[in-house]
Structure formats: C-alpha cells, structure tokens
Amino acid sequence: MKRLYYIVKKEILEIARDYISFMILIIMPVVFILIMSLSMQALFQTRSNFKIKMLVVDHNKSGESKTFLERIKKIRNLSVTVLNEETTNEQLSHDMLNSDNKFGLVMNNTFSGYINDLNKGADTKPVTLLVEPTIQTLTALVINNQIEMELSKFRLNTFFNKNAEMLSFAGIQKDNVIKSIEGVIQTIYVYKDKNQSITPNAAQQSVPAWLVFSMYFLMIPISAIFHTEKNNGTLLRLRSINVKSRYLIVGKIFAYYIISMIQVVCMLAVGRYIVPLLGGDTIQFGNTYFGLFLIATCISINAISYGLLMSVISKSLNVATGAGIVFIIILAAIGGIMVPKFVMPAFMQNLSNISPLSWGMEGFLDIMLRNGTVADIMPECLLLVGTGSIMLAITGIGLKRKIIQ
Amino acid sequence: MHKSYDDVIALNGIDLNIRNGAITGLLGPNGAGKTTLVLILTGIIKKNSGQVIINGMDLDKNLSEIQSVIGVVPQTLAFYPLLTAYENLEYFGVLYGLQGKKLKERIDFSIEVASLQSFVKKRAGKFSGGMQRRLNLAIGLLNDPKILILDEPTVGVDAQSRKYMLEMIRKINLEKKSTVIYTSHYISEIQQISDDVIIIDNGNIILNGTMDAILSSNKALALQVDPPDHSTLERIKGLPGVTCDAGTIFIDQNEMLYQNIIRVITLLKDNNIAMNNIQYNANMLEELYLRLTSERLRDEE
C-alpha cells in the first residue's frame, strides 16, 4: 500500500507542478463554461421561455397606437422596450445594433388611420419592422407574422366595436368572432424518446459538456508523464526495482481519479455559483448526489483508461497527444459536446450514441436535468466502465512491451 | 547466453564470469550488446537461452531476490525532473521496499555520496548536468546494492563531476565490497576505474581479463615518430615483440622489453628519425580496443 501511495503522490505532485496541465485541466474548461454559458443563452432558450427582444417607437402617438403597444407587450415570446416617440429610424437602428435587441418596431403616422378605416390598404405602411440581419430567416418570418396577426386582430376588433349594434342585429357576436380566430391550431410536439425531450439551458448544456471534454483531456498529462518516464529510462529503473506494471497502472488510475474529481467539483461549482453571478443560467444537481458521483466516476475511469491506452500504444508523445486530442475532438463533436444533440438531425443523433463523451454527457443530463435516478444512468455507466476495462486490459499488455522497447 | 531481437542477434552465446567485489569495465561499440547484457542481468528483459547465476541464485528462479541486491544507474537521467532531489530519493527508496529509519538513513547516505546536501529541496530538473548525474547515481545506491550496475553514468558531465563520481564509485567498491559493472564509452575511465575488463562486439565477448593482465600482456610502450623509410621500417618490424602502425611503434611487455627499447631507439637515432612522443601504458587499452573491434564507424551499419 505504501508503494501505491507514493506512486499516487508522485503523479499528483508532477501534475500540480506542471502549470500547462493545470491550465488544460482546470482553466480551459472553466473559460469554456463561462463563455458558452453566457454567449449561447439565447440559442438554448427554446419553446416556453423563448424571448426575443424588441425596441418599439410610437410615432403615431394616438390612442390606437398605445392600445396596440399594450397588445404587443402581451405577446409571450417578445420582450418589448419602448423608446422615445421622437426616435428616428436611424437612431433606432443604432440602438438595435448596439444591444441584444434583434427587432425594432415603428408605428408610423398612418397607423391610426389604417386601424380605423378598413378601406385603407397595406400601401399606407402603418408599421415598419426593422430586423437585425444575423437573425435567422425563420425567426424573422415568425415575428413578422405575429405582428401582422396582432395588427389584423386589432383592426378587426376596432371595426367590431364601431359596428357592434349592426353586427349584433345580424347575429354576429364580436367576442365569438375574435375568439374564433385565436388558438385554432393545436400544437403537439412529437418525441422519439419522451425522457430526452427536456432540453437544457445554456449552463445545463455547457457545464456537463465541457466538464466531460476536460476529463478526457487528462490524456495529455498522462501521456506526457508516461513518455517522459519511458524516454528517460525511469520505467526501466522501476522494472529493475521489480515494480510491477499493475502497480504503476493502478497508481496512475488513483492519481488521475483524484484529479478528475477535483475537475468535477470545480466545474459544477462554476456552473452553480459563478455563471449565475455573471448573468447566465444556473444548473441544478438533480435529486441524487450519489448518481452524480457515480456517473462522474464512470466517466473518469473511461477517460483515464483512454489516456493510458493512447500513451502506451503511441510511439511518441507527439503522436499520443496529437492523435489523442484529435480523436477526443471528433468524439466530442459527434457526441453533442460542441453542438447540442437536440439540434442535430436524426442520423447525427443516432451516430452520437457511439461516443463515450455522449454517454457521459447524457448521464450528467439524466441526473441534473431530467431528475433521473441511479437506475436511469446505469446503461451509460456500464458502457463507460465496460469500454474503460477493455482499454485498461490492452494498456496492461502494451505497457510490459513498451518498457522493454 | 543468447539474445536476439527478431532477426538481429544481440548476444551470440556469450559465456563470462564477473568477479565478486571487483569493478568490471564493460566496453564495446554502439550496438555491441552491452545494454542488452545489462538489461538481462537486471532482469528487465529475458534472454532467449542460457543461464545467469548471480550471488549463487538463478536469475530465472530468483528474480526478485536478485533485483533486491542490484542497484542500477541507467545512462539516461532516470528520475522525475518536477520532483525535488529528496522526493525522488524517497519515491525510489519506498519502491525499493525501504521505510522508516532505514529509508531515511539510506536517503541521507545517498545524498552525501552524491554531494547534494545543499540541493535536496530543489527540483531535479533545475540541477546542472553534473548534479543530475550525481542524483542518478544516488538513486542507484538507495538499496545498498551488493551489485552496482552503471551504464555510462558520466555522459555529459564536467571533469570535476566525473572525477568525483569515479572516486565515489571506487570508494563504495572498497568500503562496501560491492561488485560494480561499469559500461562506458570513455576508455580512459574504464582504464582508470576497472579491475577487470570485458570487451564485447557484435554480441560476442572478444576480451575478458584483469586490467593488469591485459595491459601487461600487451603494448608497454608507444613511440610516436616521424615516418621511417622503408628499410628502417622493415628492420623495426623484424624485431620480436615490436610492431609499427603508421607513425607509432609499439613495444610489447615481455622479457625482451628493455632490449627492444634500446634496439628501436638505436635504429631511430642511426637513421635520424625524430621521436615526437613516448607513452607508457597510456592509451594501451584504447589501442587494444580499437584493434579488437576495428576502427570502422558503427553508426553507418
């Protein structure tokens, strides 16, 4: 046990004193989490909490325009900020481009005339919609249609109010007509897996994603230390002392497991406490801390095994880190680390199931997002530990050969 | 003992004894088989056939017992640069199976031998080349080895560190009665430190004996002269126990030594051939080594 303790201690001391490893394992993922959590908030705000910011200017200054403004404010997916009535289109554009407001709405002087007179056509241009050009075409179309719809309803409502008696005489009830054009479409979302339907916010996606990613980057210090040991003859020296390969492997696994758990604690703390401080979304840890610990442990075993395997099968440090990192990045891209799985097309979502990083990511999301239990993450845990064990077995065989080479 | 790597024969049926308590210098060109021999003796790699007996124990049957009495100093700096000298010694000491008071005693001894007392808390990677070599040696001494195997331990160090290390190795050999196997490319080092010499080439032992016997049985004297004319050269070569190679005349150590010295000097004087240098036993081992292993460059093979 004492031998094992010193092997673990040596590995930890080496990493702790290697500032590049520290940067890669702790600083890099923290920076990624902060950047992604804060910059991707809008992208991840889907469905119920989807809000688009809009600036509004009322040049018309009429009762009709004020009423319409109130109606606009009630549209669920819009967050409206009203500017001074004297704001010109140029000033409005400037304000839009220097803020998060993607749309600008101007109620022109013709607005009240258009509302009150059904004979007036679209050529009067009662409303102008300014669109920030980077906005998706689909989003611009939706907002345009929402404004048009609201405008039509408001115009119809005004017409009914003016002609209520006549219409009542004809058997037409205003309220019934208005209600009949609202909510006529029933929307049903269709999921392949109902459990997967809950989508994460930016922090819920970024924290586990970059945590898993950084855990696989353990392969860099693992390879660096292993190849240094191999090249400077330390492995030979250890073999001449009769230190068995299994001692070295187990010692390294323990050491890197401790480091990966430090990564887990740091990243989750950043997601829980730092990201909200900077205005981002927060994350929840779910209902089972043991589940969280279990999935983190399984990812750690898989990541360490991967690092050891790459170290042993590669001829040099450059090959180990070069090929190893490229492989991680590909698996991360496939596995929904860089691009969330829910925005991927169906075949890519199926493909992502081959990536261990995806297994780890889904395990975290099961616990943190879907309030899953230990039973829910067992498939991911088994896959991670199973493939990790295979990689470790190959490492054990390869290490003996490598020492002699 | 045989050892081959795929089609390459590293050791071609060698058979040798290494004297207990002696310093044995192991010489040979690159790729001669020295490192393979060292790796087999330390149990790091396995031989294809043959038997190795160390301290009366069969290497195949008593590997861990044998490894516990062997100290290895590899030619590479086999320690951790990010750890301090003390942390390195403690780490390897524990792996040698030392603990408690014994561990501390051995660490202190090794630090003293390597003269690193003032630097134990400094990271090994920040040491000078000489200090790193001394730390490398110190680690090999941790288990108080009865057999110390040093593979080119002084590569790249300054003259002072080299002299210090050779003195320490000799001191340990004398005080602890340790058997030392010392490989080096520095023939002068081998000549200076070794009691016995083994020259190995192409996987074969081509010379094995005590340093005294090797030096005394060969060239006692080397005279560097201006190139002699043909007739003088023939007359010199005709003397028993005298050979001539370009501008150097070698006189063997035998009962005719003094007579031959007088005859050669007389011949040189009579023919007005200038004598530029006289060496007594100085580069004899090197001359012998080059003659036995041939002078061609091995890197080109």
Image (cartoon, grey):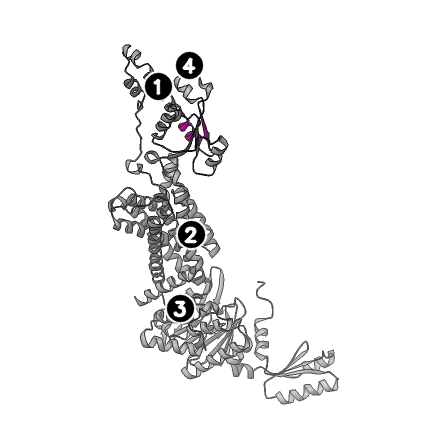
Q: CA distance from mark 3 to mark 4?
A: 99 Å
According to the image, label 1 marks what residue?
A158
Q: Earlier in the sequence, mark 3 or mark 4?
A: 4
B90 or B228: nearer the viewer = B90
Q: Which mark is residue A240?
A: 3
Q: Tag 4, which chain?
A: A
Q: CA distance from mark 4 to mark 1?
A: 13 Å
Q: Which residue lies at the image location 45% right of the left edge and 25% below the top edge?
A: A108
Q: Earlier in the sequence, mark 4 or mark 1?
A: 4
SS label for mark 2: helix
Residue B55 in view, yes or no: no
Q: Which mark is residue A119?
A: 4
* Residue A214: percent from left, percent from top: 39, 51
Number of other residues with Cα within 10 Å of mark 3, as a class: few under 14, some 14 to 19, many 20 or more: many
Viewed as shown, does residue B231 lie left or right of A148? Answer: right
Q: Earlier in the sequence, mark 1 or mark 2?
A: 2
The reply to whether discs 3 and 4 touch (Cβ–Cβ < 8 Å) is no
SS label for mark 4: loop
SS label for mark 1: helix
Q: Which mark is residue A28?
A: 2
Q: Which residues are magenta?
A: A126-145
Specify the quadrant that holds the N terminus of chain B: bottom left
Q: Amino acid at mark 2?
A: Met
SS label for mark 3: helix
